[in-house]
Image: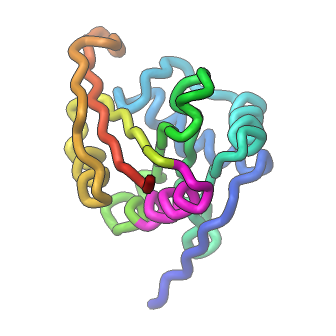
Amino acid sequence: MTISTHIRPASPLDAARICGIYNHYVTTTTVSFEEEPVAEPEMARRIADVAAAGLPWLVLVVDGALAGYAYATKWRVRPAYRHSVESSVYLDRAFAGRGFGRMLYGALLDALRGRGLHLVIGGIALPNDASAALHEALGFRKVAHFSEVGKKFGRWLDVGYWELRLGD
């Protein structure tokens, strides 16, 4: 059986499905440091804000179903940081472990290269072996580890940062 995949820019119309994917991570895991589910209008605003900043927000469609998304945001607000972004990728659990995350993240990195960006930073709540492995498989290297910077579900959480240099 052939699987059909397509990666396209997200639109605010994707907000409900994106909330369906993301809110699982918010409510059941420490992958996201958000503590309350995100409502559809807020997600639509986030998608629009990323687009307004001239950055990509991509969705992966597998056999007609929105299976995941990846996007980049500004790393910091001061002008000298304009060449660096922070990236995020989330997959519906039903599509995990099948190479879709790597495909989607690769497309995001290509889109960032096409915009002439210099550095991508991935922040990972730790422990998260799968995310660390994905980043490293795509060429990222770990550059920082902060201990106990967040608290969720009654426990202190660490965050690691991985970076990938895209170009000059």
Task: Residue at 44%, 67% (x, y): give it.
Answer: 103
Q: In which quarter of the image is residue 72?
A: top right
Report if residue 112 lies within the magenta region.
yes
Look at the image and tell me whether residue 46 can be seen.
yes
Q: Quadrant of residue 46?
A: top right
Q: In this rendering, is residue 61 above or below 109?
A: below
Magenta stretch, residue numbers: 103-117
Task: Residue at 76%, 33% (x, y): give it.
Answer: 45
Q: Give how far across and how far down residue 134 sits, in percent.
A: 29, 54
Q: Give how far across and how far down residue 106 sits, in percent.
A: 44, 63
Report if residue 99 lies within the magenta region.
no
Task: Residue at 24%, 45% (x, y): give it.
Answer: 141
Task: Residue at 69%, 59% (x, y): give it.
Answer: 9
Look at the image and tell me whether residue 40 can be seen.
no
What secondary structure is the magenta-colored segment mainly? helix
Tally of marks: 0
Q: Give how far across and how far down residue 82 sits, in percent.
A: 58, 35
Q: Give how far across and how far down residue 2 sits, in percent.
A: 48, 89
Q: Quadrant of the N terminus?
A: bottom left
Q: Nearer the viewer, residue 24 or 140?
A: 140
Q: In this view, does 2 lie to the left or right of 138?
A: right
Q: In this rendering, is residue 148 above or below 26?
A: above
Query: Which color scheme did the rendering employ for the protein?
Result: rainbow
| Residue found farthest to the bottom | 1
